[in-house]
């Protein structure tokens, strides 16, 4: 290939963040881990990424889990999560696009863009690479590498193999791609033919290029021609710049800061209509809304709100009002509103409100019926309207939560919220009472159909008429023969026990003397064939449920 032809090859700039899955894990808000720990990301039982601390211990990509843990017994094992990687990488993509448009996302942690435009704007390829590296580093990334070369493949290899943390920028001169790639191992091609090259004694990209396009094309077809182009530094693939997604969020800045909920809601009405309008232009509706309130002193209140159907402008304003009320801001009906109270999450006036879609759905799934509305839609509109008048906690729906006792599993959740979201902000351990967690000591199915929130007391007697109890060893002091139970509003009646089973101990918080609980469950069937779930705690018998 002549020098003139090489000059026509695209100059490409690549931005690379090493070990991005590990970096994304350390930046994940749900369960972050320190990137300095020995961490390995696994997919299909093999290591796909690992931290530098893990590499020091001998962990490498491609190792099986047993081998990796044998080399590093204290290795933090994490499953691969492409969604997490893309989510954490999105802010960096936006930052690079602000500095130099026309970005192609090769994979999370790896970007490519045409070098010509940034080089002209920033005064050279090296200056452009330095600026983009600083742009990414400004978002808290400690290690970022940038390279410029002929073609995306050469630029990527230059970033991966030609840079160091102390020297993060590498510029491969025009026309020098082949010389740079020549000593690299064939494994960098990441192709199925690599093992065949190794068996043939072809170990480097230079040796692959020496085979020539004709021999490679004759043996592998179009794939062989592509491998020759990559190995020789003649990658003709241009950068395919992505189309940036539309800006769907809206942010309202208050200058000066505002402390009245009514004023905040009034200022948000038009932006809320614009927010729903932008989504409508994309054929979308918002089903989950993130609201971020920022105080004058820098404090933040952030929450994700859900809707049974889809948010409109009025529903968005209502959610902002409710969040302000939770933070200590309340609006008085008529005559203005009250200010922010001290001791709340927001201890100062509000400087900005940001609304953004956390979850969207196709608008076609939420269109109104052509001939009237169905019962479910009418119920939804009625409950939503009542909730708008009474507040977030004004309309509650029952949900089944987690717990060892039947009464605490009955949860009341605000209309439109998921149970986990509703309990997430509750105190006194309510956030932990979710159904999908293990609850040792909980009652297995089938469960009683009637649960007593205020458990009535009963008496369980033996043949001599003495109260039956459970001793310190968990055994009964006598066999249950009689049970005195009041049901249906009638006076307590003594009934014979026809069958019984138990005891099953339930021991909670043995380490906390103030909240410790030690009880035993029993199931009994009386002579009227009514089945009961009883609890004996410190010699006192109560009814927890009835099997109807």
Image (cartoon, grey):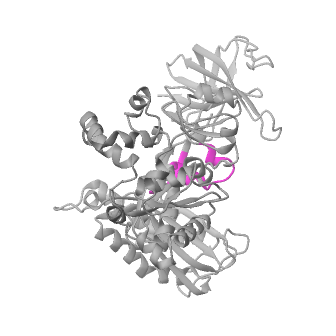
Which residue is found at the position 69% from the left and 42% from the top?
Answer: 53
Asked whether residue 397 is in view, the answer is: no
Q: Quadrant of residue 381?
A: bottom left
How many callouts does the rendering have? 0
Residue 412 included in the magenta stretch of the image: yes
Q: Quadrant of residue 238?
A: bottom left
Q: Is residue 65 above or below residue 320?
A: above
Residue 299 included in the magenta stretch of the image: no
Q: Judge by depth and name the residue closer to the eye, 314 or 348.
A: 348
Q: Position of 33 compared to 208: left or right?
A: right
- Magenta highlight range: 411-433
Q: Is residue 190 above or below residue 349?
A: above
Q: Is residue 473 above or below residue 430?
A: above
Which residue is found at the position 67% from the left and 53% from the top?
Answer: 427
Q: Judge by depth and name the residue closer to the eye, 451 or 487.
A: 451
Give coordinates of residue 38: x percent, y percent.
Answer: 68, 40
Give coordinates of residue 61: x percent, y percent.
Answer: 55, 36
Asked whether residue 507 is in view, the answer is: yes
Q: Judge by depth and name the residue closer to the eye, 108 or 283.
A: 108
Q: Quadrant of residue 385?
A: bottom left
């Amino acid at each position: 290939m002549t020098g003139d032809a090489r000059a026509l090859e695209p100059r490409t700039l690549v931005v690379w963040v090493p070990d991005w899955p590990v970096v994304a894990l350390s930046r994940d808000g749900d369960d972050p881990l320190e990137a300095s720990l020995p961490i390995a990301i696994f997919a299909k039982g093999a290591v796909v990424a690992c931290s530098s601390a893990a590499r020091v211990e001998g962990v490498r990509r491609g190792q099986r889990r047993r081998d990796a843990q044998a080399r590093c017994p204290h290795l933090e094992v994490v499953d691969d999560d492409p969604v997490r990687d893309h989510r954490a990488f999105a802010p960096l993509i936006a930052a690079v696009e602000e500095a130099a448009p026309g970005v192609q996302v090769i994979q999370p942690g790896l970007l490519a863009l045409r070098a010509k435009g940034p080089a002209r704007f920033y005064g050279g390829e090296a200056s452009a690479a330095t600026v983009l590296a600083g742009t990414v580093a400004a978002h808290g990334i400690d290690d970022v590498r940038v390279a410029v070369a002929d073609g995306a493949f050469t630029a990527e290899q230059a970033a991966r193999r030609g840079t160091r943390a102390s020297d993060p920028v590498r510029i491969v001169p025009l026309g020098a791609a082949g010389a740079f790639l020549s000593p690299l191992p064939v494994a960098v091609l990441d192709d199925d033919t690599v093992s065949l090259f190794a068996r043939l004694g072809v170990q480097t990209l230079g040796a692959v290029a020496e085979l020539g396009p004709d021999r490679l094309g004759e043996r592998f077809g179009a794939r062989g021609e592509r491998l020759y182009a990559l190995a020789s530094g003649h990658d003709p693939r241009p950068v395919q710049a992505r189309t940036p997604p539309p800006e769907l969020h809206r942010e309202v800045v208050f200058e000066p800061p505002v402390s009245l909920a009514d004023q905040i809601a009034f200022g948000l009405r038009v932006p809320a209509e614009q927010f729903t309008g932008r989504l409508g232009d994309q054929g979308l509706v918002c089903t989950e809304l993130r609201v971020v309130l920022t105080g004058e002193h820098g404090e933040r209140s952030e929450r994700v709100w859900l809707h049974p159907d889809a948010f409109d402008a009025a529903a968005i304003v209502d959610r902002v009002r409710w969040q302000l009320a939770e933070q200590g801001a309340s609006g008085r009906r008529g005559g203005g509103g009250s200010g922010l109270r001290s001791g709340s999450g927001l201890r100062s006036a509000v400087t900005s409100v940001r609304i953004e879609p956390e979850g969207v759905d196709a608008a076609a799934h939420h269109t109104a019926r052509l001939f009237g509305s169905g019962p479910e839609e009418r119920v939804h509109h009625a409950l939503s309207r009542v909730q708008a008048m009474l507040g977030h906690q004004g309309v509650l729906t029952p949900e089944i939560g987690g717990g060892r006792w039947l009464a605490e599993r009955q949860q009341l959740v605000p209309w439109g919220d998921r149970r986990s979201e509703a309990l997430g902000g509750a105190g006194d351990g309510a956030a932990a009472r979710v159904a999908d967690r293990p609850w040792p000591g909980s009652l297995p199915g089938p469960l009683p159909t009637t649960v007593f929130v205020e458990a009535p007391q009963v008496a369980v007697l033996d043949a001599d008429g003495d109260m039956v109890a459970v001793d310190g060893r968990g055994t009964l002091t006598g066999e249950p023969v009689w049970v005195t139970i009041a049901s249906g509003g009638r006076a307590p009646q003594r009934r014979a026990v026809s069958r019984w089973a138990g005891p099953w101990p339930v021991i909670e918080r043995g380490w906390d003397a103030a909240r410790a609980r030690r009880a035993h469950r029993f199931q009994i069937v009386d002579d009227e064939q009514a089945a009961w779930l009883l609890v004996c705690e410190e010699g006192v018998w109560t009814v927890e449920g009835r099997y109807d």
